[in-house]
Amino acid sequence: MATEQFDVTIIGGGPGGYVAAIRGSQLGLKVALVEKDKRLGGTCGLRGCIPTKQLLMSAHIYEQMQHAADFGVQASEIKLAFADVQKRKDKVVMKNSKGVEFLMKKNKVTVFNGYGKLQLPGKVEVTMDGGKTETIETKNIIIATGSVVRPIPGFETDGGRVVNSDHVLELKEVPKSMIVMGAGAVGVEFASVYSRFGCDTTIVELMPRLLPLEDEEVSADLAKAFRKRNIKQQLDTKLEKMEKTDTGIKLTGKTSKGETVNLETGMLLVAVGRMPFIEGLGLEGTKIKIERGAIQVDEYLRTGEPGVYAIGDVIPTPWLAHLASKEGILAVEQIAGQTAHPINLRLVPSCTYCDPEVASVGLTEKKARELGYDVKVAKFPFSASGKARIIGEEEGFVKVVSETKYDELLGVHIIGPHATELIAEACVAMQLESTAEELGRTMHAHPTISESVMEAAEGIHGLTIHM
């Protein structure tokens, strides 16, 4: 039995939990962090954001080297060493995890390895490997246990020819063919990786477009870019049956018009379905409310139990690492007695690291119109950007959505080079309630990709220069 009492105990060491732990320590709190994995970093650091982006980087370099001659660089015998790609990914993941471990020590956060379970009031029981338990006494608790892959009935993964987003990170070789079930961020990113590695890739999506949550024009441009890269797309289709054969997988589905679709592949990646990981947390019999598998919280991330907060993928806000981090900070600042400001969910950026990249913040054009705004829209294509020409990445555009009454920026949508970096400027502009005119008048260095954001904003008032 632990005798020391903590001000806050955080269950989960992902980007929500470990960031909350650091901020709590900075604010003078005595912090405990409980993590079931042997390494810190959570899904994002160990099986999500970080390893996926490393694979994407390797795919990007491989593709660039094949076009080196376009830049006057002669390169021969370019080969993909997939085993080395995986080694690089593992090295980066380990380095990141060690970095989080160092930050825990630096900030005097006590880490408990094991599964955390609530024992209200004021206790968390930790079950370690081998079944040994330890009890933490604590004034406050933050649940940050994240999400896990949700099994899809009829499409059970086996880590062999039917894989999920965890399995596909650990492949020993590039499959000859792959069908990706789901065209959300996970699906299009892995399609982008393995198609560039030489895999014959097809995406199957229930909705009529790729990245269904993004602006419709962005989805259309991504579909066009994927066709150019020979990534096949079977949209508006529900897969109904999977059959394993001696050579691969047979799939049967139907379009929304009732047409039967038959597909065959060497490997199926099930890239849909995650669910909050709340199993074994001991929520039964508490005042914590669960709806559709997610913990319900108020705008300050408080559950129904006093002193118990929940953040990240276990609650029904967008499942994004950067949002989980900010939620962790909001929760722990309240525990430390700081003034709390609820998060504006309209200003949460969305980033997809496929090729070309996609990023957005704020309202889509369609959503802005549905909400009754008098909408003005302007686009600037990267084909008109000098810097985009220099780097040889001219696909895509920046789209600015604003309204006429106050010239308020409602949304910015980008598809193209460095979109996931460029979106930060739009986030700052919208956080500061900038107008389209102010963004357009802000001087941008030349030649840069970021000028395209300025030119798109100038377009709201018909003042774009380079188009």
Image (tube, rainbow, N blue to C red):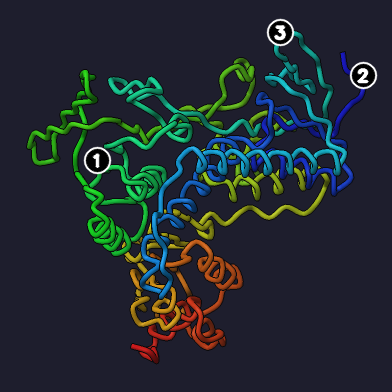
Please state the horizontal and vertical placement of residue 324, each as a whole percent of the image. Answer: 61, 45
Mark 2 residue type: Thr
Vertical side of 92 occupied by 57: above or below: below
Please state the horizontal and vertical placement of residue 256, each as a whole percent of the image. Answer: 14, 40
**Upstream in the sequence, badge 1 or badge 3?**
3
Which quarter of the image is occupied by the C terminus? Answer: bottom left
* Circle 3 residues within 10 Å: few <14, some 14–19, many ≥20: few
Please state the horizontal and vertical placement of residue 400, each as a whole percent of the image. Answer: 41, 73
Left or right position of 149 against 270: right
Q: Secondary structure at mark 1?
A: strand
Vertical side of 53 occupied by 40: above or below: above
Tag in front: 2 or 1: 1
Q: Which residue is mark 1?
A: 204
Is residue 312 visible to us here? yes
Q: CA distance from mark 2 to mark 1?
A: 54 Å
Residue placed most toward the observer, 172 or 8: 172
**Upstream in the sequence, badge 3 or badge 2?**
2
Tag in front: 3 or 2: 3
Q: Secondary structure at mark 3?
A: loop
Please state the horizontal and vertical placement of residue 212, each as a whole percent of the image. Answer: 32, 50
**Mark count:** 3
Rendered residue at 51%/39% (across/down): 86
Is residue 397 visible to us here? no
Which quarter of the image is occupied by the N terminus? Answer: top right
